[in-house]
Amino acid sequence: MHDDELVARLKQGDRTAYGELFETHSSLVFNVCHRILGNRADADDVTQDVFLHAYDALPRFRGEARLSTWLYRIAVHLSLNRQRRRKRERWLALEFLEEPENELPSRDIVSSDDTPDIIAEKQETKQIMQAAINALPEQQRVALILHRYEGLPYEEIAEVMQTSVASVESRLHRAKRNLARKLVPLLKDL
Amino acid sequence: MSMSHNDIQARLLLYLDRDLPESKEQQIRDHLSQCALCSRQLKLLAAVWQSEEARERIQPPTHLWAAIERRILRHKKDIAVPDWREIIKRYVVRPAPAFAAIAAVLLGIYIGTFSRNGESLRAQSMGQRFQPGEEFGLNQFDLVPPGSLGITLINVSNIE
């Protein structure tokens, strides 16, 4: 009911409704962008793009899916586009020969009580996990992020990715197998 | 059918999440009870998988809403009154490579057509200027006087 009411107000051009949309869904959009892109700067840019795109596309929104599902779909689509563009730019600039920069753990996960050893261990673990997830094929990576980190059920993931539930299950299954294969040799060295 | 170490290790995350059929889970449990290497790897994976889960969601930056509002205002203005620079970019600069490609193709066709026409024109003009023998001015001289036997022989050989 809340979604329907919000969409109706948004279509009427109610600016406070747009502020409510942002407050309710900005964390969801930012987190999924950050998970896919791996850094705050790109996540920041793409989150803005998502809400701008939503602003343009709202008149055409039919309400068949939930607002959050719709926003997830836009966020995934724009994040993947940004990532593909970055890869092309790195390839053209010959930066693919260098290691990509790894972002430090955010303040949210590093506690003030952590010793330098623990901080370093958390950073290493995060980098290992991020590298392994980034190495997954695109569709498997997205399915894993939406299920594991966003907590979406299979049905909603299928709506976001515009595929079937069986396909989502298969992608998740393969994602976890591929992830385990990549993580095991990396963790051996820890 | 027994599984190899690689098969077991590939399924460890699925095992941790209980995403396997019971028969496969049992096979892995049996293997882990006898294999120190795979047991250790399971512990390492569990530590990483669980530490990820415990991580909180990241808060979006505080300036985000202000930045979005500014972009929406700018966007509204662009839609209402397109900037002349934007018009030039949209209708001239962006399609320029396509226009250049079309122009190159048309030029190539024109040059190809012209060069073929040029050759046939040149051939025609060469043909009109000279009949065989004319280029050395031989038509100016009758080699054989008209009415003579020589002319009759030449005419007979031409018929053959």
Image (cartoon, coloured by chain):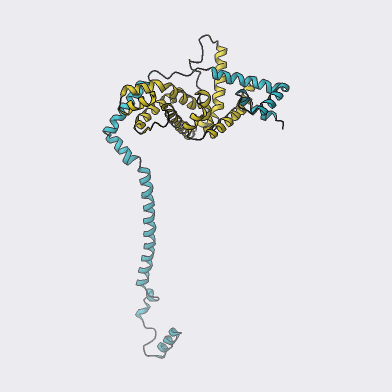
Is residue A182 in view? yes
Location of residue A106 with respect to A10 vertically, above or below = above
Residue B160 x, y percent position in the rendering: 46, 84
Is residue A190 in view? no
Q: Residue B2 occupies which quadrant of the picture?
A: top right
Is residue A190 found left or right of A102 in the rendered image? right
Tell me what residue is drawn at x 55 percent, y 12 percent: A116
Number of labelled discs? 0
Image quadrant for the N terminus of chain B?
top right
Residue farthest to the left, as pictured: B81
Is residue A3 found left or right of B41 in the rendered image? left
Q: Residue A72 occupies which quadrant of the picture?
A: top left
Residue farthest to the top, as pictured: A113
Residue A101 x, y percent position in the rendering: 50, 24
- As drawn, the chain in yellow is A
Residue A70 x, y percent position in the rendering: 42, 30
Residue A175 x, y percent position in the rendering: 57, 30
Q: Looking at this view, is A185 or A25 the one in front? A: A25
Chain B, hue in figure? cyan
Tell me what residue is drawn at x 58 percent, y 30 percent: A173
Residue farthest to the right, as pictured: B34
Q: Residue A171 occupies which quadrant of the picture?
A: top right
Location of residue A144 with respect to B136 vertically, above or below = above
Tell me what residue is drawn at x 37 percent, y 53 percent: B106
Q: Looking at this view, is A155 or A143 the one in front? A: A155
Q: Looking at this view, is B15 or A130 the one in front? A: B15
